Image: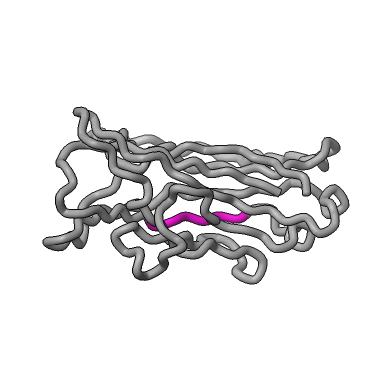
Amino acid sequence: MKATSRGTRIGAATLGAVVLSTIFGAAVATAEEDHDKDDVDVTVEIPAIDSPGVLALTVDGDSTTLTENGSTDLVRQFTGTMPTVTVTDTRSADEIPAGAYWYVLGTATNFTGDEGQAPINANYLGWTPRLIDADPGSISAGDPVYSAVDDDQAPDNVGLVDEELFAMAADSGAIAAEGQWTATADLSLRTPATVADGTYTSTITLSLFE
């Protein structure tokens, strides 16, 4: 099985945010007489791609922020959402080996404090992958991964400390005509209530294989 990987790193704590601002100005109305108008047709010919197609992964953004939500006296909980992840396959069916399938794996680093706090282990970070624009019959989202404080729910699937399945296609050739698929994951950092306050940063790395 030939493997192709492309890692994308995402900050999973309080990193930079993208702020969109719009400036509204006063418009001065002027009276103008419309003497004439005409149309221009725009035509473009897009030729077929002669070079071999590619299988690639992109992420719509390089950071996300977790905010406190649903904490209890015993557990601090911080949630957020990963930027949209897109897998694109521009290969023709005859370029894909028979029986090939692609899959995306994710892993996270420990959360590092900005003022020397003890790090928060990545086994406290979980996710729930979900499809956005993909046929569930051709693409599958990975199973939820739980925090170490919830290891009673899934003792063998705790934390993004190993390569965890984000999404996969069972047969690359069978779905190649679709061309593109998108997914995301709901993130949840659940720690003991005794964790030190401050700003922490982790990195999630996504890798695409076939």
- Tell me the quarter of the picture where residue 53 sits: top right
Colour scheme of the rendered structure = one colour
- Tell me the quarter of the picture where residue 199 sits: top left
Q: At which x and y percent is residue 65?
A: 30, 44
In-image side of 210 versus 97 (left or right): left
Q: Is residue 136 above or below residue 93?
A: below
Q: Is residue 107 above or below residue 148?
A: above
Which residue shows up at 70% across the image and 63% down it? Answer: 170
Q: At which x and y percent is residue 32?
A: 38, 35
In-image side of 187 versus 179 (left or right): left
Residue furthest toward the right? Answer: 94
Residue range in magenta is: 181-186
Residue 175 is inside the magenta segment: no
Return the residue nearer the eye: 186 or 3.
3
Which residue shows up at 63% across the image and 53% down it? Answer: 103
Q: At which x and y percent is residue 184?
A: 47, 55
Q: At which x and y percent is residue 4?
A: 70, 41
Q: Is residue 76 above or below residue 14?
A: below
- Tell me the quarter of the picture where residue 26 sits: top left
**Residue 105 seen in this snapshot:** yes
Residue furthest toward the left? Answer: 73
Which residue shows up at 59% across the image and 62% down it? Answer: 134
Return the residue nearer the eye: 28 or 18.
18
The tally of labels here is 0
In-image side of 185 versus 207 (left or right): left
Return the residue nearer the eye: 88 or 41.
88
Return the residue nearer the eye: 22 or 34.
22
**Residue 17 seen in this snapshot:** no
Principal secondary structure, stretch drawn in magenta:
strand
